[in-house]
Image (tube, grey):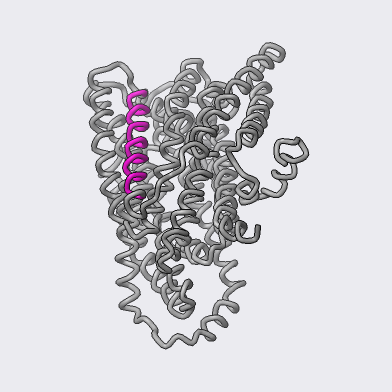
Amino acid sequence: MADNSRKNNFIMQAGILAAAGIISRIIGLLYRSPLQRVIGDLGMGYYHSAYNYYTIILLISSYSIPSAISKVIAQKLAVKEYRNAHRLFHCALAYVLTVGGIASLFLFFGAGWFVGKEAVPVLRTFAPTIFIYGILGVLRGYFQAHKSMAQTSVSQILEQIANAVVSVGAAWLLIRAAMGTMEIPETEADQVLRATNGAVGSALGTGAGVAVALLFMLGVYGLNRGLILKRVQRDRHKKVDSYGEMFKTITFVVMPFILSTAVYNLSSTVNNAIYTNWYLHSKELGATDIYSRWGIFNGQALTISNIPIAFATAMASAMIPSVAQMIAADDREGAREKIGLSVKTTMIISIPCAVGLLVLARPITGLLFSNKTAEAENLATKLLMALSLSVIFYALSTLNSSILQGLGKVRTPIVNAAVALTVQTGIAMALLQWTKLDLYSIAVANTVYSFLMCVLNQWAVRRAVGYRQEITRSFLLPFLASVFMGVTAWAVYEGLLLLTASPRIAVIPAILAGAMVYFSMLILMKGISESELRGFPKGYLLVRIAKKCRLMR
C-alpha cells in the first residue's frame, strides 16, 4: 500500500491543484452573474473580445512559465543540484521581467491593431497584468518543481476572490461615474459608453487578482527562503552552470512551451476574430448584436464548459515535472504507468461532467446566470449542450499536450494544434457563410478542434513511449456509469420541478443524486480500485464511505 501511495502521490498533488482550480472557477462563475447584471451582455462581449487577445499575448510572454520552469528545475532537483536549481530560478525571473515588460508595452500601444475602438480601453487595461503575471508564474513553477501544489492552489483561490470583488466593484463605480446612473440608456452611443466602462472595470479586477496572488507567493517564498538557501549551501556538486548556459536552457525550454500553449489556445482568439470581425462584415450585421451574442457564448456557455477541464489542467501541471524526472532517470515503464493512471483519472472526472452538462444545461445556466430574455437563456442553454462533448476531448488533449512536453516532444503539440486549428477555422467560416447555424457554427468548430487535438496527441504519446491505454476501465465503464447518472439526474430534476416549479431549487438535488449514482455504479462495475480511490484528495474518506455503503469490500 505504501508503494501505491507513492505512485499515486502525483495524483494527490494534481487533485489539490484541481480542487483549487475548480473552486477558483466556481468563484469565477458566481461573480459572473452579478457582473453580467452590472455591465450587460454588450459589456461582456467587449470584455471577452479584449480578453482573448490579452490571453494570446500572455501565453506568448508569460503563461507557460510555471510549466516550463517546473520542468527545468525538477530535472536539477532530481539529481540534487540545488545550487543550479536556484540559479535557474533567478534566471527565470530576469527572463520574465524582460519579456513581460516588452509584451505589456506592446499590448498597451498596439491595442488598436487587435480590437475595435470600443474595446481598446479594455485591452489597454489588461496590459500591466502581463508583466505582473510573469513574476507570479516563476514563483508558482518553482514550487511545482518541488512537487508541491499547495502554494499555487491557495494563490489561485486568492487571485479569483480578489478578481471577483474588484471586477464587480470597479465596474459599478466606473459606470456610475460615467453615466450618473446604473440604468440602461436608450441611445446606442450611450449603451456602448456604459458597456465599455463596465468592461474596463472588469479588466481591472483581473489585474488586481494577479497582484494579490503575487503578494501571497512572495510571502511564501520569503518564509521558505532561509531553508532554500541552507540547502543551496550544502550542495556539494562541483559543476555550476553559468548564467549564459541557464538563459540558453530557459530559452530553449520556454519557447517550445510558449509556442505549444499559444497555438493550442489560439482557437478561442481565432473564433473571436471570425465571429466579431469577419462574420460581422461579411453579413453586414449590427456590431452591438454580434458582441452581445458573443458575450453569451464566451461569458456563459464556454465559461461553464471550461470548469471540468480544470482537473485536466491541474493533472497536466503535476505530470510535467513527474514525467520529466522519470525520463531523466530512464524509467520509461514508470512513465507509462503514470500516463495511464493520469488518463484514467481524468476520464473518470471528465466524462460524467460532459454528460451532466448535456442533461442539465438549462437549469445549470439558469442557476449561474440571470438572462433577461427567454431568447438569451435558450441561446446559452443550447450552446452549452453543443459544447458538452468538447469537455472530454479538451480534457484529454490538454493532459496529453503536457505529457508530450514532459517527454521532451515539445514540438509535437505545436504541429498538432496547427493542424487542428486550420481545420477548425475552415469549418467555422464555411458553416457561418453557408448555413444559418450562426454561433452554433463556432460551437461545432470548437468541438472538432478539441477532437482532432485529442486524437493527434494521444497517437503521439503512444508512439513516444510505446504506451497503450487500457480502454474498458478508463473509458467504457465511466461512460456507462455516466449514462445511469444522467438518467437519474434528469428524472430527479423533472420530478422536483413538478413539485417546486423552481429550476434553481430542483437542480442542486439532481446534481447530488447524479453524483451519488455515478460514484456507486463506477465502484460496482469495478471501474476504480481501492488504491486508485485513495489516490484522490480525501480518498481515505471516499473509501470509508464506499465500504460503509457496502459498495467496496
Q: Position of residue 536 (x, y in %)?
A: 62, 49
For residue 57, side relative to residue 75 (left or right): left
Q: Main secondary structure of the magenta part?
A: helix
Residue toward you, 187 or 57: 57
Q: Quadrant of residue 422?
A: top left
Question: Is residue 447 at all visible to an observer of this figure?
Answer: yes
Residue at point 64% right, 35% down?
A: 519
Magenta segment includes 443: yes
- Residue drawn at (48%, 52%) of the image: 207
Q: Is residue 59 left or right of residue 321?
A: left
x, y (%) of residue 122?
A: 39, 43
Q: Is residue 145 above or below residue 283?
A: below
Residue 75 at what x, y percent from top left? 43, 69
Q: Nearer the viewer, residue 489 or 548?
A: 548
Horizontal relation, residue 411 to residue 501: left or right: left
Q: Which residues are magenta?
A: 440-461
Please say whether residue 374 is one of the residues in the magenta stretch: no
Instruction: Decide: is 38 above or below 101.
Output: above
Of residues 71 and 119, the one nearer the viewer is: 71
* Residue visible at 52% across and 61% down in the picture: 214
> 189 or 421: nearer the eye?
421
Quarter of the picture containing the C terminus is top right
Residue 66 seen from this side: no
Q: Position of residue 149 (x, y in %)?
A: 56, 58
Q: Residue at x 43, y 69 (%)?
A: 329
175 sits left or right of 519 in the view: left
Count of numbered badges drawn on the protein: 0
